[in-house]
Amino acid sequence: MTRAWRSETFVGCVLASPLEVEVGGASSILVATGDGRVVALDPADGTTRWSVTLPHAPAEMAHVIAYLFSVSYTDDP
């Protein structure tokens, strides 16, 4: 296996699996970082497209949290 590219070095750990999204026809890889940022990477070369630091209280750190849920129903009354 050969590394395709290298992104910036993130502070702390990456908190979840990277997620590929498409906005306006362009793909990006979203990463939630251990230092409270969400970063969009170019999937072709790993460069940072944009980064946002999540709001947090002084002396605290923001974290991205996602909940997995499912909804099911039946046609039975």
Image (cartoon, rainbow, N blue to C red):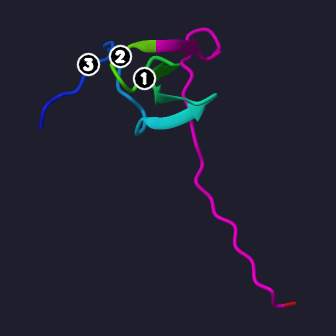
Cα distance in 3D space between marks 1 and 3? 18 Å
Q: Is residue 7 left or right of residue 19?
A: left
Q: Secondary structure at mark 2?
A: loop
* Residue in the picture at 53% in, 13% down: 51
Nearer to me, 40 or 25: 25
Residue holding disc 3: 6
Q: Is residue 68 magenta?
A: yes
| Magenta region | 49-76
The answer to whether residue 70 is above or below residue 20 is: below
Residues at marks 1 and 2 touching, judged by CB atoms closer than 8 Å: yes
* Residue in the picture at 54% in, 18% down: 61
Position of residue 14 measured from the top left corner of the image (x, y, whole percent): 38, 29
Q: Residue furthest left?
A: 1
Q: Is residue 1 left or right of residue 10?
A: left
Residue holding disc 2: 10
Residues at marks 2 and 3 touching, judged by CB atoms closer than 8 Å: no
Q: Amino acid at mark 1?
A: Gly
